[in-house]
Amino acid sequence: GENVEQHPSTLSVQEGDSAVIKCTYSDSASNYFPWYKQELGKGPQLIIDIRSNVGEKKDQRIAVTLNKTAKHFSLHITETQPEDSAVYFCAASKGGSYIPTFGRGTSLIVHP
Amino acid sequence: DSGVTQTPKHLITATGQRVTLRCSPRSGDLSVYWYQQSLDQGLQFLIQYYNGEERAKGNILERFSAQQFPDLHSELNLSSLELGDSALYFCASSVEGQATDTQYFGPGTRLTVL
């Protein structure tokens, strides 16, 4: 089955810096890659997703890039703010399956 | 607000007891998923229902069971509780229950077993 590895497990940055979280996946048939943000005491919420027919997608300070050849995708957050502090999960899934495979999460800490 | 509701928000109980967690999906979503998240752990998939029928099963213990009712709300039943069952339990919903659908998560139920 699919295996998703997420790095780093913890990321500490200064406010205003950029943050990058990387995920690798094993199943070349995977074609949908969402990113979720989980704030303390809340459920994960989708922040951005990308499908395999595009290489990059951007939404204000957040972007996701996908390299299908290398089977990895990354979340980029620019101009980080303290409210970006949260746990971020990546996931990978493919058509015809029912359950996405989640990474183990990255705890992002943005210091003011 | 994702539109997914879960009750109760917190639950404290003793070992050996049985509890029921409830989830109402977003309006229009036919599929419900249950996840367990232990301290500093990722999301462990437990079980999925689609339009009242079980569709996929993950690492769900035999002591745990779930169902989805005709109005599409779902309940997760946890019995013979052990200390290790203490965790956050999340419900998520999606439109068609495909892995490529966006999942919308509820706020979770925090279960503490003493």
Image (cartoon, coloured by chain):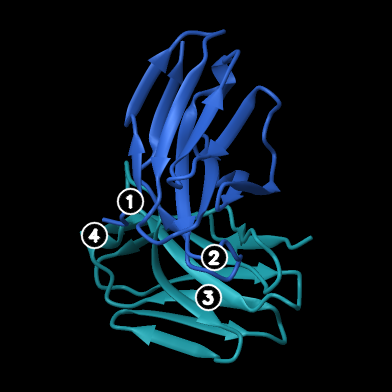
Which residue is at the front of the view, A15 or B83?
Answer: B83
| Displayed quadrant of residue B8 | top left
Which residue matches tag 2? B96
Amino acid on which disc 2 is placed: Glu
Disc 3 element: strand
Residue A88 visible to the viewer:
no
Q: Nearer the viewer, mark 1 or mark 3?
A: 1
Q: Residues within 10 Å of mark 1 (few under 14, many from 20)?
A: some
Three-letter amino acid code at the position of disc 4:
Glu
Q: Is residue A77 above or below residue B113?
A: below
Can I make out residue B51 in this image? yes
Query: In the displayed structure, does residue B24 sit left or right of residue B19?
Result: left
Q: Secondary structure at mark 2?
A: loop
Disc 2: which chain?
B
Q: Quadrant of residue A81?
A: bottom left
Outermost residue toward the front in this view: B70
Residue that label 4 marks: A83
Where residue A18 sits, quadrant-wise, is: bottom left
Amino acid under disc 3: Ser
Where residue B57 appears, x then y in whole percent?
A: 69, 45
Pointers 1 and 2 within a single chain: no
Q: For the residue carrying disc 3, how many other residues have a C-alpha within 10 Å: few (<14), some (14-19), or many (20+)?
A: many
Chain to which the residue tagged by mark 3 belongs: A
Viewed as shown, does residue B112 lie left or right of B55?
left
Whether discs 2 and 4 lie on one chain: the answer is: no
